[in-house]
Image (cartoon, rainbow, N blue to C red):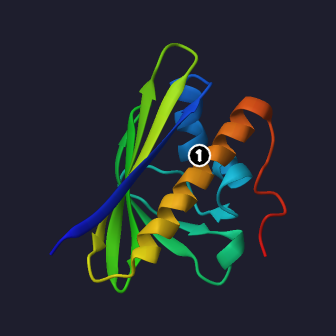
Amino acid sequence: MDERKFQVQLKIRKPVAEVFNAVVDPKTLTRYFVQTSSGPLVEGATVKWVFAEAQDHPFDVIVREVRKNERVVLEWPGGHGYQTSVTMEFKPLDGENTMVQISESGWHADSPLSLACGNAGGWMHMMCCLKALLEYDVRLRAGGAR
């Protein structure tokens, strides 16, 4: 079966440790991405994420791998009864800038393409909101839900 996957990336003008912590720490994550998170992203944990746009549908996020300031690997529902794998890579460009790359794989070829495309847009939106928060202290998602 042919697998669908994608990758998005964005440069954030902050040191890698600050960017990484903003992703794994639920106090910061809820300022720009999810409405609630049941805990930090630590290896072996299952965390519940609730999005403002889908409050009645919390997502179980299984944290498979965490390498501080380098990488986070998650699994979560891809739709139609299977999980997809999300890999977040944090690459220092120099002491003050970080490239964040997010890839998601495991989409089944018989699933609607709109599922993978929607998530690609969602991860890009997440990174834009992260950039706005860390670089300018602006909360882009505030008031953005239905």
User: Label 1: which residue?
Assistant: 127
Residue 21's spot in the image, x, y percent? 56, 37
Residue 37, image x, y percentages? 61, 61
Which residue is at 72% across, 70% downward? 52
In the image, farthest residue toward the top: 95
Q: Amino acid at mark 1?
A: Met
Front residue of 59 and 124: 124
User: Which residue is located at x 57 percent, y 76 percent?
Assistant: 58
Residue 84, given in percent of the width and then of the height, sits at 34, 67
- Image-based side of 80 in relation to 40, left or right: left
**Percent of width and height locating residue 100:** 48, 37
Q: Is residue 49 above or below residue 140?
A: below
State whether residue 25 appears in this view. Answer: no
Figure check: 14 above or below 87: above
Please report the residue visible at 39 percent of the width from the left and 81 percent of the height from the top: 112
Q: Determine crowd level at label 1: few under 14, some 14-19, many 20+ residues with C-alpha closer than 10 A.
A: many
Q: What secondary structure is found at the residue carrying circle 1?
A: helix
- Residue 123, placed above or below residue 72: below
* Quadrant in which the C terminus is drawn: bottom right
Q: In the depicted view, which residue is nearer to us: 31 or 110?
A: 110
Name the side, left or right, on which 61 lies relative to 2.
right
Q: Is residue 132 left or right of residue 94?
A: right
